[in-house]
Amino acid sequence: MGIGKKIVGSKSVSRDSFIVDLCKNKRVLHVGCTDYPFFKKAYEQGYFLHEKVSKAAKKVVGIDIAHADITEMREYGYDARVIDAQEMSSSFQEESFEIVLLADVIEHIENPGKVIRESIKVLEKEGLIIVTVPNTFGIIRFLKSFFRPFDRLVKGINGALGRGRGEHLSV
């Protein structure tokens, strides 16, 4: 199959919509639930995944190691717990889940294999583990990475020229 050929039956779907559809009426464990450090902003602007999943699922338990964000999530009424994903099965000996959700979190974990094994331990027999990772080739990320070196160069030039506030070279 060459570049530019359409894959029959393919379609583009929103990550969040895809996840929410899979979580409908299920018991979900959301690993990395806080979107640290963006919880409050994500919640206020309507793109907080945990909120979307909570509206669709039968039950959602969120875990994360970001203490302050977990505390804040509890204040908003979420079942959120400070638990390290690499040791989570010991905290859920009496609970099991139909879905374990690892949305854009696995790349931040020291031992991803251990987290997958821990996920299997808390998962029901016919359960599902959902793992997503950021698209490093997305256009926004590409543009940010492309222009970041120029931004640093301009800052360096301004510093070298001794320019004060308001007297900046720009690109």
Image: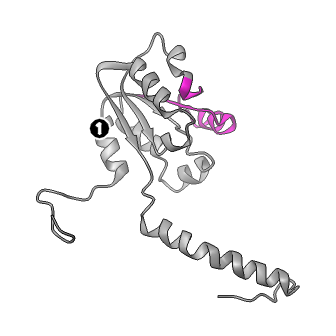
Tell whether position 54 is magenta. no
Judged from the image, the secondary structure of the residue bearing numbered disc 1 is: helix
Q: Quadrant of the C terminus?
A: bottom right
Q: Which residues are magenta?
A: 59-86
* Residue 23 in the image, given as x and y percentages of width and height: 33, 35
- Looking at the image, the residue that sits furthest to the top is 94
Q: Quadrant of the N terminus?
A: bottom left
Q: Along the horizontal axis of the image, is 156 left or right of 29?
A: right
- Looking at the image, the residue that sits furthest to the front is 2
Q: For this rendering, which residue is in front, 66 or 23?
A: 66
Query: What's the residue type where badge 1 is placed?
Result: Leu
Task: Tell me if mark 1 has few (under 14), some (14-19) or many (20+) residues whose alpha carbon lies within 10 angstroms of its own.
Answer: some
Seen in the picture, residue 106 relative to 25 is either above or below; the reply is below
Seen in the picture, residue 60 relative to 53 is either above or below; the reply is above
- Quadrant in which residue 155 is drawn: bottom right
* Residue 26 in the image, given as x and y percentages of width and height: 32, 28
* Residue 46 in the image, given as x and y percentages of width and height: 48, 53
Residue at 21% of width from left, 58% of height from top?
11
Q: For this rendering, which residue is in front, 111 or 43?
A: 111
Residue at 62% of width from left, 34% of height from top?
70
Residue at 60% of width from left, 45% of height from top?
36
Seen in the picture, residue 132 relative to 163 is either above or below; the reply is above
Residue at 46% of width from left, 33% of height from top?
30
Tell whether position 73 is magenta. yes
How many marks on residues?
A: 1
